[in-house]
Image: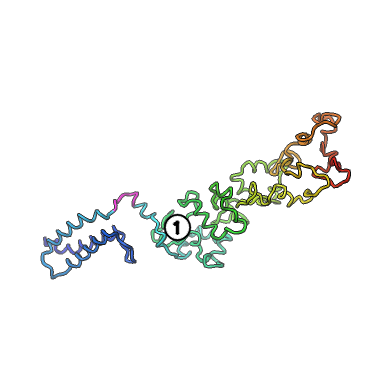
């Protein structure tokens, strides 16, 4: 019992420390549950009393402390299992996190920081910030990192925002970080757009941490290669003999489409397909004295804009294309015969040259 007399104060202090840890007591002002407050106050008072040399029999005090710990320690302690230990580190306390500066990030993420600093995004945020948000550097997107640093880092540790494909944060939350700066302009219609409703993340198309492309920080070297990740049929069409000059770099997908959303069909930048075509082919706009009805209705009645095996992006070669609407009556022979005049060279266009419309007074049949 003499041994216990000397150890009793130490055991009491240890028991108090164990209780503090089990209740996650914080000197900064964390609140206890009511039952835990009572336990803490009782044990705290006991420690002060047992450390008083004026007290008498400490053997009984030690027994009382042992009984107290046995009866109350299990009320607040959590089961110590391996999965629980792992989740404890990964637990996030976003309300307690604070900003620590990008210099703390460099300590562990040196390679990523060097790569990021060479991008347009990185040159602005790390070297030439224009507002208080950009001055936060890495934390302007990833959120305050104090808890991440305190818990020694790791994926999804400390409430840090992650933009990986398999990140725990839903796509909407990840996109919201980007939209906090980029929601205006071309992104006005992102919400409820085709790509947004199908669960695309900004990082599916854009790579912020590395410079893969000359412009717009795409995940691929070019805009079209980025789009071709999903639109593989369009990629195949672009390699046909007659194609839009995308491969030659004269136009891009965004010349006609706004991938961030529009109020128009197929994410077109203009109200109709014809209006999109007229941005380059203004000579086809008209108005004409003699209109060709299918042309005025939709350019895609005759053309496949992404690529074709026929001349001028035609869906079907002439004269078969024309015969979809026009009867062969009035011509002296069947145009399908390749030996006849209606099938050689440009077929119907040999005579009807002004297929898009004519302003000639005698152009009723689009001959001139």
- Could you tell whether 282 is left or right of 68 in the image? right
Q: Which residue is mark 1?
A: 160
Q: Is residue 113 left or right of residue 224?
A: left
- Residue at (17% x, 62% y) in the render: 8
> Where residue 332 sits: x, y (%)?
86, 29
Q: Does the segment drawn in magenta span residue 242?
A: no
- Quarter-of-image position of residue 326: top right
Front residue (pair 309, 104): 309
Q: Quadrant of residue 317?
A: top right
Q: Is residue 366 above or below residue 219?
A: above
* Spot occupied by residue 275 in the image (x, y as percentages of width and height): 72, 50
Quarter holding the C terminus is top right
The answer to whether residue 128 is left or right of residue 302 is left
The secondary structure type at the circle numbered 1 is loop
Give the percent coordinates (x, y) of residue 293: 77, 42
Q: In this view, which residue lies farthest toward the bottom? A: 54
For the N terminus, the quadrant is: bottom left
> Among all residues in the image, which is located at the extreme right?
362
Q: Residue at x 11, y 67 (%)?
A: 56
Stretch in magenta: 78-84
- Residue 222 visible in rendering: no
Can residue 142 be seen at all in this image of the molecule?
A: yes
Quadrant of the image occupied by residue 47: bottom left
């Amino acid at each position: 019992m003499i041994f216990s007399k000397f150890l009793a104060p130490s055991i009491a202090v240890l028991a108090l420390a164990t209780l503090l840890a089990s209740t996650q007591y914080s000197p900064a002002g964390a609140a206890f549950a009511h039952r835990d407050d009572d336990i803490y106050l009782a044990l705290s008072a006991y420690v002060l009393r047992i450390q008083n040399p004026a007290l008498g029999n400490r053997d009984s005090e030690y027994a009382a402390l042992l009984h107290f710990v046995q009866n109350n320690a299990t009320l607040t302690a959590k089961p110590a299992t391996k999965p629980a230990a792992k989740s404890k580190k990964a637990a996030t306390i976003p309300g307690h996190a604070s900003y620590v500066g990008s210099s703390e990030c460099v300590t562990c993420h040196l390679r990523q920081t060097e790569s990021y600093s060479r991008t347009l995004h990185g040159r602005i945020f790390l070297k030439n910030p224009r507002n208080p948000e950009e001055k936060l550097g890495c934390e302007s997107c990833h959120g305050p990192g104090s808890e991440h640093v305190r818990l020694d880092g790791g994926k999804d540790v400390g409430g840090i925002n992650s933009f990986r494909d398999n990140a725990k944060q839903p796509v909407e939350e990840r996109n919201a970080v980007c939209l906090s700066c980029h929601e205006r302009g071309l992104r006005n219609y992102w919400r409820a757009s085709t790509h947004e409703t199908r669960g695309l993340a900004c990082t599916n198309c854009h790579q912020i941490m590395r410079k893969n492309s000359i412009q717009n920080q795409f995940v691929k070297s070019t805009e079209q290669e980025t789009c071709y990740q999903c639109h593989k049929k369009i990629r195949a069409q672009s390699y046909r003999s007659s194609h839009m000059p995308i491969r030659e770099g004269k136009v891009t997908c965004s010349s006609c489409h706004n991938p961030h959303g529009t109020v128009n069909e197929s994410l077109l930048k203009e109200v109709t397909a014809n209006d999109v075509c007229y941005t380059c082919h203004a000579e086809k706009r008209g108005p004409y004295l003699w209109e060709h009805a299918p042309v005025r209705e939709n350019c895609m009645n005759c053309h496949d804009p992404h690529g074709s095996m026929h001349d001028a992006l035609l869906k079907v070669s002439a004269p078969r294309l024309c015969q979809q609407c026009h009867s062969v009556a009035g011509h002296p022979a069947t145009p399908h015969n390749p030996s006849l005049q209606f099938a050689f060279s440009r077929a119907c266009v040999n005579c009807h040259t002004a297929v898009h419309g004519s302003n000639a007074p005698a152009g009723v049949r689009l001959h001139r």
